[in-house]
Image: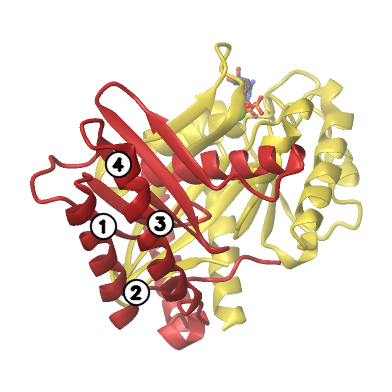
Chain colours: A red, B yellow
Amino acid sequence: MVEPAIALFGAAYEKSVTVLDDLLRESGARYALLLDRKGFVLAHKEALWAPRPPSLDSLATLVAGNAAATQALAKMLGEPRFNELLHQGTTHGMYAEEVGELALLVVIFDTSVPVGRIKLYGKRAVSALETLTKDAVVNPAKMGIDTEYRDGASALLDELFRN
Amino acid sequence: MSTINFAAREINFKIVYYGPGMSGKTTNLKWVFQQVPPNRKGEMISLATEDERTLFFDFLPVDLGEVKGFKTRFHLYTVPGQVFYNASRKLILRGVDGVVFVADSAPNRLRANAESMRNLRENLNEYGIKTEEIPLILQANKRDVQDALPMEMIQAVIDPESRYTIHEAIATNGTGVFETLKAVSRSVLSRVVAAG
Ligand SMILES: Nc1nc2c(ncn2[C@@H]2O[C@H](COP(=O)(O)OP(=O)(O)OP(=O)(O)O)[C@@H](O)[C@H]2O)c(=O)[nH]1
Ligand SMILES: [Mg+2]
């Protein structure tokens, strides 16, 4: 199967951001991200008090790779899946959970916040996000990805990758 | 299939550099990283061993710019080419939009090239993808090595039906690197349009 395209737009996007925002407020976490399984950021939110996050692209890629590796391990051990990923350091922690088949939720928190709280609100957010991402699978043509788009992009390729 | 983030009006493509160990996949990405201006690229991440062999993947995001109001980005990945890293190599192919196969022109690597291509087919098949269904670009790298394999010989083992053109490259000095990347990007763009 070629992985379907997910597009979060309009109401679905707004709702996802609200879910992430609620999650941050209720749990006291720093950053929350919704990613697709390939490691692309679909939506993200930072707590008002939090400093600028590290590169979200890099973060998303590493989490998606990590999650894929974890699921492969689960299969090898005869488990259908390992439910969540949790990493705890001295000052920061990271929690990641699958959002259906297509997406991942990532929460970065300070270790002063109890992990139980992160998990509780994390799981709540996951069930809300699951429906949203399921409905967000689209056909590129409907979004205006057409030959005009292709030719425009192609011209930019020559500009950027000039020898 | 590509990811579209309409909220940010962004469209993303995932391109994977595949090929046998030491063929120069990471070197291709390093060249792109060096050449693309800072405002058009993100950090390059390399998950590698002490001796610089790729362990899990290299990653480099490149911003093409805006087209029809869509910010267009390419996420470039390399896989670890060494045979025994197949489990991780397979994971990197998940959700791939286009593949660059980097073959090694060194005379003792003919068989490794053939095996890696076969492995690519097998791994794509496990995702239910036929090699013919995905944009695939071939590169013969290390054209500068002594006694480099003739192009026809490389093609014969990785593309016996001569379906594809092979781009010659010397990734260490950048020869052919952009040409290859442009070819795969164009092919991916055409594909997303045709899919619509
Ligand atoms: N002579 C020559 N050497 C090259 C060329 N491209 C890469 N190399 C060298 O080949 C070695 C391996 O290159 P990498 O880019 O690390 O190879 P890789 O395909 O990423 O290898 P894995 O990560 O193990 O799969 C390095 O020492 C490079 O400098 C080339 O065009 N010519
Ligand atoms: Mg490498």
| A40 in relation to B42, above or below | below
In the rendered image, which residue does mark 4 sit on? A108
Few, some or many residues within 10 Å of mark 4 (<14, 14–19, 20+): many
Counting residues from the N terminus, which is met first, the one under dot 4 or under dot 3? 4
Task: Tell me the element at label 2.
Answer: loop
Few, some or many residues within 10 Å of mark 2 (<14, 14–19, 20+): some
Q: Are marks 2 and 1 in contact (CB under 8 Å)?
A: no
Q: Amino acid at mark 2?
A: Phe
Q: Amino acid at mark 1?
A: Leu
For the point 38% across and 37% down, the residue is B35
In the rendered image, which residue does mark 1 sit on? A23
For the point 67% across and 36% down, the residue is B88
Chain bearing tag 2 is B
Measure the alpha-carbon separation of dots 3 and 1: 10 Å
Instruction: Say which of marks 4 and 2 sits in front.
Output: 4
In the rendered image, which residue does mark 3 sit on? A123
In the rendered image, which residue does mark 2 sit on? B6
Instruction: Say which of marks 4 and 3 sits in front.
Output: 3
Locate residue B53 relative to residue B162 in the image: left or right: left
